[in-house]
């Protein structure tokens, strides 16, 4: 039986239950799924190492340290679970690639950490929600399993940011962190013109273009920053190249 080759108008819409089935579909499918998984392997590890683990040390009290420990544990766990999918597919070690520039943001305070979780983990939620509909079932199932944790990280960030925003003296620092973090998060979604994103959509790994995902992040981010904090959302472009 031959199935017609997928196109962007009629993408692949099957369900692929295992690494063996992915291999049987061909190298293009494995490469599309593999690239998405590899970026999560790298970014979950980079985030845990440069943000979540250091946040334990700057957390102001035992309760905050406990929360930071839990978040760091979960993010390292995400790295390990994506890495397991990567080895099942027989992919080369994804850690050889470079993590995103987002992870160059220098984190020094608890305030920056809570704003970071509100902003950067919102981006992670948007990306993972897409994977929860992915044609590769091991990846779909993992995304469904991890989404409650990512949503918890983002809601932790929002709740703590909101609390700090009640103190007038903190608001300029919160605004500055938002301005910086929104800008470093935008490239997370990839370039506006992206051969990789075309491949992801062709194979039903993702449904949205990079700009559509970025627009979703901006819209949800703005509604939190403006609607709930009464601060300004930076004036940013949806396109990125
Ligand atoms: Fe994560
Ligand atoms: Fe997270």
Image: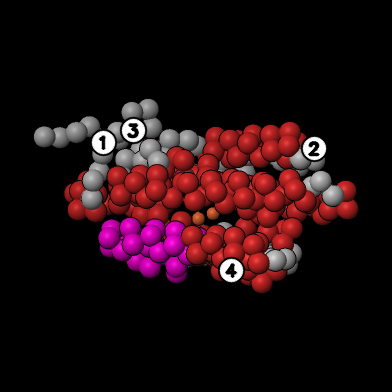
Q: Are marks 4 and 1 in contact (CB under 8 Å)?
A: no
Identify the secondary structure beneath mark 1.
Answer: loop
The residues bearing labels 3 and 1 have C-alpha atoms spaced at a distance of: 9 Å
- Give the residue at mark 4: 53
Q: Which is more toward the observer, 193 or 59?
A: 59
- Give the residue at mark 3: 11
Q: Position of residue 106 (x, y in %)?
A: 70, 65
- Give the residue at mark 2: 230
Identify the secondary structure beneath mark 4.
Answer: helix
Disc nearest the viewer among 4 and 1 = 4
Q: Which is more toward the observer, 210 or 78?
A: 78
Q: Earlier in the sequence, mark 1 or mark 2?
A: 1
Is 7 located above or below residue 163 in the figure? above
**Left of 182 or right of it: where is 137?**
left
The residues bearing labels 2 and 3 have C-alpha atoms spaced at a distance of: 42 Å
Work out which residue is located at the far right of the displayed protein and give it. Answer: 169
What residue sits 22% from the left and 32% below the top? 4
Q: Residues within 10 Å of mark 2 (few under 14, many from 20)?
A: few
Span colored in magenta = 75-96
Q: Are marks 1 and 2 in contact (CB under 8 Å)?
A: no
**Per the image, is 238 magenta?**
no
- Give the residue at mark 1: 14
Q: Residues within 10 Å of mark 1 (few under 14, many from 20)?
A: few
Is 23 located above or below residue 109 in the figure? above
What residue sits 34% from the left and 33% below the top? 11
Q: Residues within 10 Å of mark 4 (few under 14, many from 20)?
A: some
Disc nearest the viewer among 3 and 1 = 1
**Per the image, is 81 magenta?**
yes
């Amino acid at each position: 039986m031959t199935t017609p080759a997928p196109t962007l108008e009629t993408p692949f819409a099957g369900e692929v239950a295992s690494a063996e089935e992915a291999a049987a579909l061909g190298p293009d499918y494995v490469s599309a799924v593999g690239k998405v998984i590899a970026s999560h392997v790298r970014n979950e590890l980079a985030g845990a190492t440069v943000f979540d683990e250091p946040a334990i040390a700057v957390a102001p009290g035992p309760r905050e340290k406990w929360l930071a420990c839990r978040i760091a544990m979960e993010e390292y766990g995400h790295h390990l679970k994506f890495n397991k999918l990567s080895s099942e597919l027989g992919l080369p070690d994804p850690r050889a690639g470079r993590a995103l520039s987002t992870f160059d943001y220098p984190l020094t305070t608890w305030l920056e950490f809570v704003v970071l979780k509100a902003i950067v983990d919102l981006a992670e939620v948007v990306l993972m929600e897409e994977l929860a509909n992915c044609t590769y079932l091991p990846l779909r199932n993992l995304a469904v399993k991890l989404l409650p944790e990512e949503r918890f990280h983002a809601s932790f960030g929002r709740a703590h940011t909101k609390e700090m925003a009640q103190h007038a003296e903190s608001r300029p620092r919160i605004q500055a962190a938002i301005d910086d973090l929104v800008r470093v998060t935008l490239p997370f979604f990839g370039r506006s013109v992206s051969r990789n994103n075309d491949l992801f959509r062709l194979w039903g790994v993702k449904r949205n273009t990079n700009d559509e995902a970025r627009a979703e992040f901006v819209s949800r981010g703005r509604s939190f920053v403006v609607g709930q904090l009464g601060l300004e959302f930076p004036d940013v472009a949806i396109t990125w190249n």
